[in-house]
Amino acid sequence: MLFKNKKTTSSDGAQPAKTKAPIADAHYLSVRESRAIAKSNARVIRALEKRKKRTHVSESEYLCEMQDPNNIVEFDDLRTYFFTDAGVSKAVDGVTFSIPRGATVGVVGESGCGKSVTSLSLMQLVQAPQGQIVGGSIRFNMGNKAYDIAKMPISEMRKIRGKQIAMIFQEPMTSLNPVFRIGYQLDEMVLLHTPGCTKEQAKARSLQMLELVGIAAPERVYRCYPHELSGGMRQRVMIAIALSCDPRLIIADEPTTALDVTIQAQVLDLLREIKGKIDGSIMLITHDLGVIAEMADYVVVMYAGRVIESGTTAEIFHNPLHPYTVGLQKSKPVVNRKVERLYNIPGQVPNPIDMPDYCYFKDRCTRCTARCEGEYPHFIQVSPTHRVACYLYAGEDGKGGPDA
Amino acid sequence: MPKRKVQRQDAVPKSEPQREAEQAAPAEVPANEAVQAAQAEVPANEAVQAAQAEVPASKEAVQAEEGAAKQPEAPAEPLDPEALLEVRHLKKYFPAQKNFFGKPKTWLRAVDDVSFKIKTGTTLGIVGESGCGKTTLGRTILRLQPATGGEVYFDGKDINKLKNAEMNALRPQMQIIFQDPYSSLSPRMPVGEIIGEAVAQHKLVPRSDLKNYVLDIMRRCGLPYHYYERYPHEFSGGQRQRICIATALALQPRFVVCDEPVSALDVSIQAQIINLLKDMQDSMHLTYIFISHDLSVVEHISDRVGVMYLGSLVEYADTDEIFRNPMHPYTEALFSAVPVPDPDAHSHRIILSGDIPSPVNAPSGCKFHTRCNRCMEICSQVAPKFKDYGNGHMVACHLYSQE
């Protein structure tokens, strides 16, 4: 597949004498360039969409084998790109990690680092047609068999989405429909995914779920509209909807960012409690390191569309290796830990349309060496669970074990 | 103008002592005198403004002159000379329900009897859940909306008694940085114009120097000079917040209300903005009110911290003191709810049940008693006094002696 990106140096090719003033902005695109990009994008998108929208696809096409049967999901070199008129934005560019059964995996990173797009790829909910999974695989363990979600057609995906994988979104107000009662929205989910379910059974199940998430008067809330509930209650309803079909995996995309600290404590407590009851895995996406430390068993740190470090929570918090992980932890003020001045990571995230071919963090890194000029670093396995993509910990060949 | 103000105050329900005080009337007299004095002052003020337009350096002189003119407005209790801002019994009520004739029936008490003072060059952090009146407090202090009752003394003057023209002359000294940098910048104006607009309006520098002045303030806020011609949509959240800070600081204020300036930003960008705010405080001797719901940020930046619950301060003390020794059960619960980025530090967490009650019909007695885990019988009947328990550590709670 050939993706046409904008010319690397737009001012070099054109004659500088003719232009009135040199354009300071390196991201400037002429109309012609932009149109050429749009045209080539349209070609790629059309092919990908056609493939996704097929019906009657034989199961063998997306059947696959799990590398480790104890994992519930394995991301393998996942690539999700957005085809914009300014060029191809590589939102997720080669992400590899897995979620073990019964564990909570936290994904941290700044906004725009691709953590949400990774989870949306898993649900096949990336904003189409611009956003497309263009490579890699997402192996999902169905119990007796495994499916590759990246290759599944939409019609098949509908059977898994919501039933096997449920999602809790960041903004409970925008994800609940304001014109339907809570009860209707809960029942809908149960009726859709349970064949032969009657309305009475669905209602009983919904009330049971509302009780499970700690709502004191389920009958009353069942008849409420979303605007009648407070933020914490809405988030509880969202969790109840997500749990109603006994999913194997719950994706919680910043579930507490819009809530107050006291309500956040309630919701986190609830999530922890529920995980014990349902025996499922949680993929927790957040930018709050405190929430991660409290909830997660494993941590994945993402930066500019790639995983830069992953390991158990203890490894990441007590022995962070990548300079970005270290910087992220130092830049957050902590209650009862006095510092005169906060550490700040200099510079900004590189433009996702125009990624450099060396380590993406090099321009902001305070510890970069001559080797960082080379290609993007490979993963270095520091311990069986801990790996980092940084030349500081690489052997002579750039791949080997730790020497630092 | 003064007449209208009297009407507005009458429209609000008054407590008994307040009414008695008004009938007794002596409190009214000095205020009237002040108004007359202020009226007499107007032509002089205009002259001062004209002079200001020509000589920007004479700003201090103008302030001194204005300060001298307002002598009669001195309040009954003497003001703390070290405090730049002193707030006394500030109230802000919004009509919640209206009857058939459009008269308010019930009131939403967004800010209910808040008092504190801030020393020059220090930072006061205000924390609390959403809906507790933090933002309303900040806006009422700046008179962006009229107060329902109480006084705000800025530099010895009660700003609620100032006339509009006088208030406008004072505005450059009191600035605000808003929460959301995406909606607080005009999308149709380039950065240079946004920052320079208020400077030109208040005639702080001559027109010819305006651009250099704006470029200078941009440089100090970490914005490269070629951003001058760009529009807000071209910037990321952190850069926009820098623009907002530059806009506020371009007027050479003495007092800035920071209304959740870092809540919408990423962790690494947050650190940059907090450092910038601290640097600016050191170089320009600014006094901040820092409103936030993020306790760790407030602890880092503040000298004193006030905890608000349903429109009232429940605890107010030095930062070290309040974080080491939180006295009010709400403060304790709030602090224990903050997630700590350390997997081993599983502290004992106090989880508050339920949500914050509606401020329209707040609970009787202590407003927190519905969610308090150490609630006693008296809590639902009598409102606790806001008392000093040594070292300026003020708490409103029945757990501690009320005598």
Image (cartoon, coloured by chain):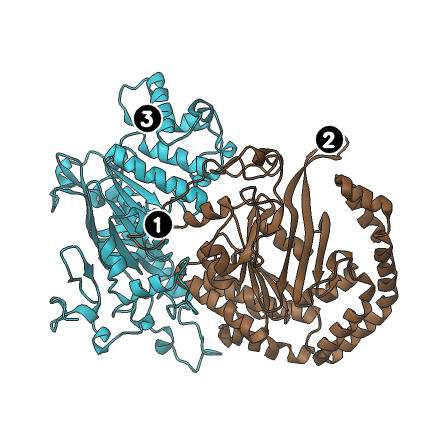
Chain colours: A cyan, B brown
Left or right of A17, for residue B37: right
Residue type at the position of mark 3: Val
- In front: B147, or A178? B147
Q: How far separated are the C-alphas under marks 3 and 1?
A: 30 Å
- In front: B327, or A61? B327
Question: Circle 1 — which element?
Answer: helix
Residue at 51 percent of width and 76 percent of height: B225
Q: Are marks 1 and 2 on the same chain?
A: no
- In front: B116, or A261? B116
| Residues at marks 2 and 3 touching, judged by CB atoms closer than 8 Å | no
Residue type at the position of mark 2: Asn
- As drawn, the label of residue A209 is none
- In front: B42, or A147? B42
Residue at 21 percent of width and 40 percent of height: A102
Quarter where residue A377 is shown = bottom left
Q: Are marks 3 and 1 on the same chain?
A: yes
**Residue B118 appearing in the image:** yes
Left or right of B163, for residue B292: left
Kindly identify which residue carries mark 2: B99
Question: Circle 2 — which element?
Answer: loop
Kindly identify which residue carries mark 3: A190
| Residues at marks 1 and 2 touching, judged by CB atoms closer than 8 Å | no
Badge 2 sits on which subunit?
A: B
Neighbor class of circle 1 (other Cα within 10 Å; few <14, some 14-19, many 20+) is many
Neighbor class of circle 2 (other Cα within 10 Å; few <14, some 14-19, many 20+) is few
Q: How far separated are the C-alphas under marks 2 and 3?
A: 45 Å
Q: Position of residue B70 (x, y in %)?
A: 80, 66
Residue at 41 percent of width and 44 percent of height: A264
- As drawn, the label of residue A291 is 1
Q: Mark 3 against mark 1, which lies toward the viewer?
A: 1
Left or right of A279, for residue A67: left
